[in-house]
Image (cartoon, rainbow, N blue to C red):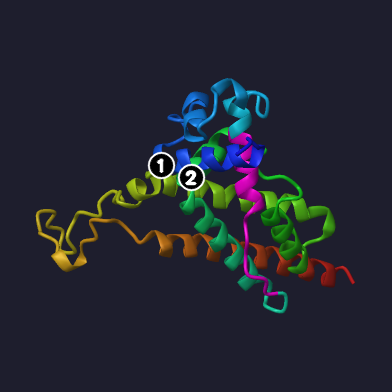
Amino acid sequence: MPLTEAGIYAAALRLIDADGVEALTMRKLATALDANPMSLYHHVPNKEAVLRGVTRMVGAQFRTVTLEDAPWQERIRLLATDFRTLAHRHPELMAYSFSHQPDFIQPDDPFWTALTAIVEAAGVPQSEVSEIAALMVAVVIGVLAAELNGSLHQWSTLKPPGSDDGEDGDGDADPDPADVAPEGPDQDHMFRLVMDTLITGLESRLTGDRDGRDAGL
């Protein structure tokens, strides 16, 4: 079967999912495709180009349920959840993209197109849509990156200063095993909390803008 860019990207994604980005080499990719390594360079110039192509391919495959008649809060929650699902489907690639490819989201990507449409539907002025959407992306990606590299789990198990003290002031009191969560807070719950915070913040901003306009009448 002749080599194609799409075939190269698909094979590279399988290798990345299995062994990670660092393990991907042009030679391993050629072996997976049963091709001469030099023949790959007729289609892609180097590994970095392969990674960009794979990221664009995955981004173009993003799908979310369309709820045009639903409140914008529900739509944005679903969009973020579907983006999170995609990140966990290809954790090695997405973790790399989050930290090494600041341009991995493009204007024509389905995720960005859907997000900006929802932000505009929420009532954000057209001049601020891109800014608000960019901030939301930054927060969501930050949380997902922390999920994928284990930082979120690590941080969530840290205790506030003084939290080891018992209510009666006896710091040596043993906690009830039923109250201990060795795995840390549930990450699904934490992601919902992030989205609640983002949505509440935007609602407050929009309400403040409306009140300001009304006060100026």
State which quarter of the image contains the N terminus: top right
Number of residue marks: 2
Is 58 on the left or on the right of 14, as rendered?
right
- Residue at 9%, 54% in the rendered image: 172
Q: Amino acid at mark 1?
A: Ala
Is 39 on the left or on the right of 207, as rendered?
left
Dot placed on the residue nearer the N-terminal end, 2 or 1: 1
Residue 78 in sight here: yes
- Residue at 52%, 42% in the rendered image: 13
Q: Which residue is mark 1?
A: 18
Label 1 crowd (10 A; few <14 / some 14-19 / many >=20): few
- Magenta residues (range): 51-67
Residue 115 placement (x, y as % from top left): 69, 59
Query: Is residue 95 in the magenta section?
Result: no
| Farthest right residue in view | 217
Residue 190 placement (x, y as % from top left): 43, 60
Q: Nearer the viewer, residue 65 or 30?
A: 30
Q: Amino acid at mark 2?
A: Ala
Q: Which residue is mark 2?
A: 145
Q: Nearer the viewer, residue 120 or 213?
A: 120
Q: Nearer the viewer, residue 20 or 184?
A: 20
